[in-house]
Amino acid sequence: MIKTRFAPSPTGFLHVGGLRTALYNYLIAKKNNGKFVLRIEDTDQRRKIPGAVENLLENLKWVGIEPDEGPGIGGPDGPYIQSQRLSIYQELVQTLIEKGCAYYCFCSPERLQQLKDWQVAHHQPPRYDQHCRNLGPAAVKRLLDEEQPSVIRMKIPSEGAVTVTDLIRGTVTFPCDQLDDQVLLKSDGFPTYHLANVIDDHLMHITHVIRGEEWLPSTPKHILLYDYFGWEKPQFAHLSLLLNPDKSKLSKRQGDVAVEDYRRQGYLPEALLNYLALLGWNPGNEREIFSLEELVQEFSLERVGKSGAIFNLEKLRWMNGYYIRHYSFERLFNLARPFFPPGSETNPDKQLKVLEIIRDSLLNLQEITEKSAFFFAEHLDYNHSSIGEWLLKPEALPVLNSLSAEFQSLTSLSGARLVPLMGNVMKATGLRGKLPWMVLRCALTGQSQGPELHHIVEVLDLNQCRQRLQDAIHFVTAKRDGR
């Protein structure tokens, strides 16, 4: 059975690159009727952030990628949090020492820093100089008996090379003389990533290790560890990086990178997953819209490319707009309600009508706050240039006065009555064309563009329209009089 895993560290937010990795692992598992495992790699306790695991689980649930095994879920190969598996690592690393594949290192942090400084100064790659590699058993025992601080390092072969067969990148060979005698177990008894992930992937029966390309240089060490333990190796696939438009690595310095950021801005989970799936994977045709179920059927690692993928926010916005327009209205409204202006929650019927009007113009739900504000505002701000060019024209005040008179004469208001009403205004003022309509729009909305006016008057009640026309008249009069 195929089994994949997503193994993040609880050191902060879920990066969109991490979500893409989780998605690809999920798709491979589900396409092959396999299992998708969530494992928390928290061996670096100094960087652990409280609440990060809960936040991670919540965001995976939000996008619809729920693990078959993991923290809070259970499974046959738990526990799924590495800090709860220390005795496993400590026991197995001793077998490597017994086989002569690992050794105790007693070098102090000060010595290691001096070594690194010297190597850097002499333009050499920083790596351990194997100072403790050939300590005899008696010396090791004496130092351990003296309780000297120590770590356990793996022995890299002195010559030869390690070949990595990657499902995306093909065959990659690493000369052993370019590899370091990696620390496997730290002095505090916690394993490094290299030891823990190999042991856990084996004991959790992971068949495919799908992760970011930054781990490719570490993979030869992992392959050596599999060989040292005598275990069957999983298949490896290293995904390309997500890039900013300038080809730099996608990072917080150039914009939002956390799933939580996009969720807060009103991006829909289906849109975010659909978009991330296409960052590196080519479906083989021009199709761009896929449900999660369709991705399970269509996805394959054979169509995942080696090159970095540009994270194009405008493309994500377009795709999110597509999903907004195609969501069931009931579900969309439930997601949209938190984005309406404060105070509007007391009038859900009006919120509903507003969403119907502005839905097709939305690229994310956060835009609702601004695009719906004028519907719920008690007073509008007319003092800005985008509408001033219309309201401050000499012809605007006669139009406003005529509009006010027409609206006062109404007993009810509907979009259908707007055209004949505007005909009366044009006849009374002798003004035709765009200007009377723009004056009405600016007066009722405080904006020079937006939804169709006949939709707007269906939502604003008659008294609101009357009051706003009066407010606009007061504004124009005050400006004319220099107040």
Image: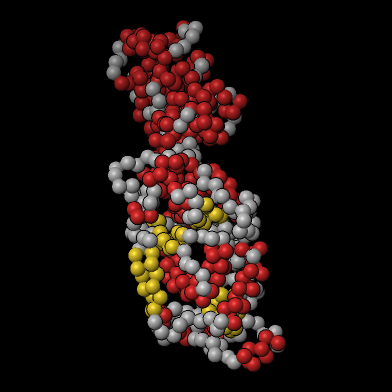
Identified at 55% across, 50% down, the residue is 67
In the picture, measured across the screen, residue 47 lies left or right of residue 298, that is right
Identified at 42% across, 70% down, the residue is 217
Report the label total.
Answer: 0
Question: Is 427 situated above or below 118?
Answer: above
299 and 462: which is toward the camera: 299
Identified at 58% across, 91% down, the residue is 135
Q: Is residue 81 visible from the viewing direction of this image?
A: yes
Horizontal and vertical percent position of residue 146 = 70, 88
Q: Quadrant of residue 429?
A: top left
Q: Quadrant of residue 442?
A: top left
In the picture, measured across the screen, residue 67 lies left or right of residue 215, that is right
73 and 471: which is toward the camera: 73
Horizontal and vertical percent position of residue 345 = 59, 28
Q: Quadrant of residue 357?
A: top left
Q: How is the image coloured?
A: secondary structure
Horizontal and vertical percent position of residue 57 = 58, 49
Question: Is 137 situated above or below 22?
Answer: below
Identified at 64% across, 56% down, the residue is 50
Q: Is residue 80 visible from the viewing direction of this image?
A: no
